[in-house]
Amino acid sequence: MKKSKWLQSAILARYSGILHGFSTSLIGDASSAEQSVLLSCSLGVKKNQLQLMSQQHGCDIKIINDVERPLPRVDALITNVRGVALGVRTADCVPILIYDPQNRVIAAVHAGWRGGAEHVAGKTVDLMKHSFNTKAPDCIVAIGPAIGECCFEVGQEVIDKFPSSSVAGGTHLDLPAAIVTELTDTGIKRDNIDWLNICTSCEKGLCFSHRRDKGMTGRHLAMIMMCDI
């Protein structure tokens, strides 16, 4: 695998006026808000443009019109405002970036197994539909590095919250695959979902992993922003 500081979705990259990326461990640690701002600047975002979340491992979602402080206590953000960069920080959880090119709306979603079980990704798309007239078949989605089923062994209490199609060997959860299914159930076309399919636990030279490193690790930054066309 090519070692890059930033990973990008080939599908999202086709759209002008969209800045996005998934940082890797090669560029640094996004654990703090200050570090995240520095990383985003390397991608072309200004210091006052990045909006992060105080992620709660739930399914609360917020629509924002400007950068807010303190950080909203949610796991998904939506905006139709140009120049506001939405950011997600992860180290095994699934980072999801969504773009509606027809209505010019973006979203950034943080989905751990709890958020996945509560359908935070699907609920974000539903809120985009309700608030911005988004049509699911128009949406483009990029799913960044996350822990894969190969490394994500969980207990029965977690397995029971997901469809059997997302479980391998009875004990291993394929959380990104579950989220892909959830998104297609909202009406998003499978061909419009770019799943990078990189396991954070396996890719030690590229990714941080909370599970692999027993909590002693950094964070990636996933980011999306609309710019002037």
Image (cartoon, grey):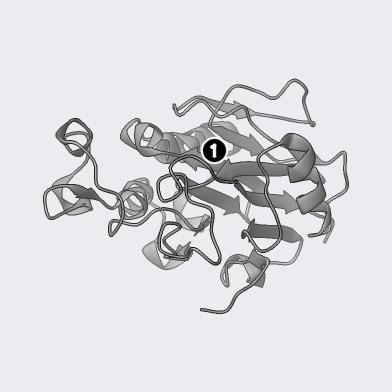
> Where residue 22 appears, x then y in whole percent?
62, 58
Of all residues, the one furthest to the left in this rendering is 170
Q: Is residue 124 above or below residue 15?
A: above
Q: Which residue is mark 1?
A: 128
Foreground: 2 or 47?
Answer: 2
> Where residue 166 appears, x then y in whole percent?
22, 51
> Could you tell me which residue is drawn at 60 percent across and 27 percent down?
62
Evaluate whether residue 125 shows in this view: yes
Which quadrant of the view contains residue 43?
A: bottom right
> Could you tell me which residue is drawn at 28 percent across and 53 percent down?
174
- Residue type, label 1: Met
> Could you tell me which residue is drawn at 76 percent across and 61 percent down?
17
Foreground: 81 or 55?
Answer: 55
Within 10 angstroms of label 1, few (less than 14), some, or many (20 or more) residues? many
Number of labels in the image equals 1
> Could you tell me which residue is drawn at 56 percent across and 40 percent down?
133
User: Helix, strand, or loop for circle 1?
Assistant: helix
> Where residue 169 appears, x then y in whole percent?
12, 55
111 relative position to 9: left or right: left
